[in-house]
Image (cartoon, rainbow, N blue to C red):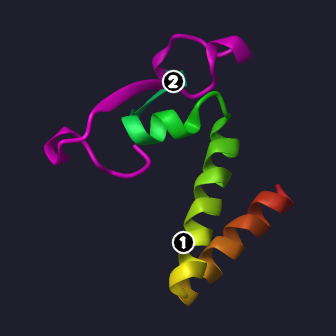
């Protein structure tokens, strides 16, 4: 789970395909994960890499707004890793 929240927190959990069926994914346990409803809807039909980067972009924008220098630095390091790989 991306956010770490679950039913104990009052959050609905969804079963999700890591690689969607229309992109060649399978209905197997190794191609599945659990996501809260919010993250499942944000992810839509993106790959984990695409969805992850979108999530970090969102975190980065929030960090910029509140001037969280530690998170800004962390996100920049993550973006560098995305660019490198």
51 or 58: nearer the viewer: 58
Name the image quarter holding residue 31: top right
Q: How many numbered callouts?
A: 2
Mark 2, secondary structure of its residue: helix
Q: Is residue 71 visible to us here?
A: no
Do the residues bearing badges 2 and 1 touch, measured as CB atoms within 8 Å?
no
10 or 26: nearer the viewer: 10
Residue 81 position, x and y percent, is 75, 64
- Count neighbours of disc 1 (C-alpha within 10 A) and say few if under 14, some if 14 to 19, many if 20 or more: some
Which residue is painted at 46% across and 41% down in the image?
A: 39
Looking at the image, is mark 2 or mark 1 earlier in the sequence? 2
Residues rendered magenta in the picture: 1-29
Which residue is painted at 58% across and 54% down in the image?
A: 55
Name the image quarter holding residue 45: top right
Q: Is residue 74 left or right of residue 80?
A: left
Mark 1, secondary structure of its residue: helix
Quadrant in which the N terminus appears: top left
Name the image quarter holding residue 29: top left
The residue at which mark 1 appears reads as 62
Q: Is residue 77 left or right of residue 64?
A: right
76 or 43: nearer the viewer: 43
Quadrant in which the C terminus appears: bottom right
The residue at which mark 2 appears reads as 30
Residue 13 position, x and y percent, is 31, 32
Which residue is painted at 61% across and 70% down in the image?
A: 61
Instruction: Select label 2 or label 1 by which is in front.
Output: 1
Residue 28 bears which disc, if any? none
Q: Is residue 6 visible to us here?
A: yes
Residue 70 position, x and y percent, is 54, 86
């Amino acid at each position: 789970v991306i956010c770490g929240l679950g039913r104990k927190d009052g959050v609905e959990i969804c079963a999700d395909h890591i690689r969607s069926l229309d992109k060649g994914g399978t209905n197997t346990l190794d191609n599945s994960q659990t996501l809260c409803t919010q993250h499942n809807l944000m992810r839509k039909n993106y790959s984990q890499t695409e969805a992850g980067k979108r999530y970090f972009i969102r975190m980065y924008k929030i960090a910029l707004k509140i001037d969280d220098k530690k998170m800004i630095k962390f996100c920049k390091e993550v973006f560098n890793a995305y660019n490198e790989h």
